[in-house]
Amino acid sequence: MTELHPTRAGELPKALTGIRGLDEVTRGGLPRGRPTLVCGGPGSGKTLVALTFLVNGATRFDEPGVLMTFEENGEEIANDVASLGFDLPALIAAKKLAVDYVHVERSEIEETGEYDLEGLFVRLDYAIKSVGAKRVVLDTIESLFAGLSNTNILRAELRRLFRWLKDRGMTAVITGERGDGLLTRQGLEEYVSDAVILLDHRVHDQTSTRRLRVVKYRGSHHGTNEYPFLIGADGISVLPVSSMALQHDAPLDRVSSGVASLDQMLSGSGYYRGSTILVSGTAGTGKTSLAAHFLNAACGRGERCLWFLFEESPQQLLRNMRSVGIDLAPWVAAGLLQFHADRPSRHGLETHLVSMHQLVADFKPSVTVIDPVTNLMTVGTYADVQAMLTRLIDHLKTENVTAMLTSLTPAADETDSTISSLMDTWIVLANDSVDGVYRRGLGLRKSRGMAHSNEIREFELSDQGLHMLAPAAERREAEAPRRTSLKGQGHRVAVI
Amino acid sequence: MLQSSETETFLLRLYIAGQTPKSLGALTNLKIICEAHLQGRYELEIIDLVENPALAGGDQILAVPTLVRRLPEPIKKIIGDLSNRERVLVGLDLRSR
């Protein structure tokens, strides 16, 4: 994993892309004054990465830019990126961006004798001067190979072009389509050797994930992993797991769990606001009920709650919770509680993450529940899921949203340890058969930053909701004959 | 058979970038071809992109030299130093392929 260090001494100067995550992976951005190749298959997001670099340069870093586009005209590109909030016409009007659409129609061209691409240089030079550009994007210059037949001239001219850009100190992004056995169809990587970023859009078990990898970065340290990245309503973000900057506020105020006796176990006042709570247990241990108590209390305080359902429909959930005495329907009617039910397998992790980000951004909940988070694990590998959850939790913490994740655990599993390190509080529920009856137990495996109870408490779920029985020690004194322990083979509660 | 291109007036534009050998060669070659095949029915405009860089975009000029046949339509472009007369004539639709 890349560490989050700023550009190290002795490294060449860099230009920030402003793309969240990418600047961390590259330790400060792209090589300043030099060209970077961004390559990938069709639809992998090359153009978007390049444009984001350009637009951020113009809007955030006071570095105007030139877009030379070979595939789509300026209007088409402006439309493509308008949904991301990029207003290209405004940037052009403000002289922060120049767009030149280079179009070669082979059918109307006859080649005879020697030529060069000085016309391209003239146009680029003109565009650069018109806005005082510091950044240049060529998207996708390989299209020229389809328009002109003399590849020897083309190659020589491209080599000259990249040198020319360097001589002018342009921080450039050149996009290239992935070729057969090559990073780009025409082997551009041979000419652009300073930095190469590879984008990938792959389908795993019929769900898609986007990835980014820095293949090469001359004269600089960089993260070498493949990082998942997202294209969302607010543009691109790359997810280096270490991007969890750990700079969130650590609020001291508490929010009730909705169960008074559980609040007592949590040093008397419940969870920390903005913290992340994992509730794990096997099927039927009361995870969802515990979440419902929590949301019920939050809505009772007038707070907005968002519940992601990956297993049940909202109707099922409402019915089931009514059976334990929690009626959430009024909160839905009041607009305080919103459900978002989805099948995990419907989308890739990326899409889930994006839609969850968007829902959180739109609804602005103070509490959110993901139930069960383990269902997402069917969509990708553990590493993918962990990266996604890290990013999501990071985001929720930044927004000061208290999050509860339920985890359906088989008896022996790895899943909890995969994500539990991201959690502030970990509640383990068990349902053990003791003397021919199932008895429910709740334990706090951990709760950061507070003196929490280390007891395992037995509880009951009735039409009055979740009711915690007296601590075992007290009950031992009161009713010695019923003394039992919540022991069960393979159950985690028993070994806490 | 008389083609329409054999009667119409040709409007030609030659894009060059400075007085390079390729530019000068193209201009010489073009003048010879025009005098031989289009005498009295062509107009030639020469645009030096070094002096007028803003004009390169309009005709989608990339390669230099580029000869553009603006009229008769459709627009035709011939890139290179125009040293191959046959291909220039084909490009101008003055000779079938």
Image (spheres, rainbow, N blue to C red):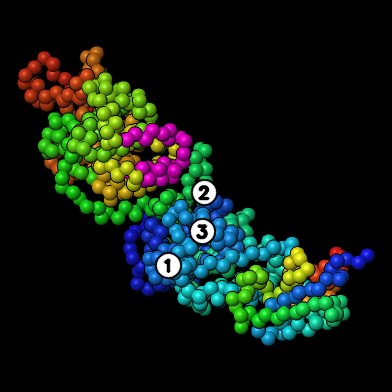
Task: Report how far apart the C-alphas of labels 2 and 1 lie in the structure.
Answer: 28 Å
Mark 1 — on which chain does it sit?
Answer: A
Q: In the image, which is nearer the foreground, mark 1 or mark 3?
A: 3
Q: Quadrant of residue A29?
A: bottom left
- Is residue A354 rendered magenta in the image? yes
Q: Nearer the viewer, mark 3 or mark 2?
A: 3
- The x, y position of residue A351, in whole percent, is 44, 43
Q: Residue at x 60, y 59 (%)?
A: A71
A121 left or right, relative to A365 = right
Does the residue at mark 3 contact the one at mark 2 (Cβ under 8 Å)?
no
* The C terminus of chain A - image quarter: top left
A360 up-or-down from B64: above or below: above
Q: Mark 3 sits on what residue? A: A78
The amino acid at mark 1 is: Ala
Can residue A187 be seen at all in this image of the molecule? no
Q: Position of residue A36 (x, y in %)?
A: 50, 66
Q: CA distance from mark 3 to mark 2?
A: 23 Å
Mark before the other along the chain sequence, 1 or 3: 1
* Number of residues whose C-alpha sits closer than 10 Å to that of mark 1, classed few (under 14), some (14–19) or many (20 or more): many
Q: Which residue is mark 1?
A: A58
Residue depicted at x 16% and y 42%? A254
User: Which residue is under mark 2?
Assistant: A201
Q: Chain of mark 2?
A: A
Q: Nearer the viewer, residue B36 or B72?
A: B72
Quadrant holding the N terminus of chain A: bottom left
Residues in magenta?
A337-360
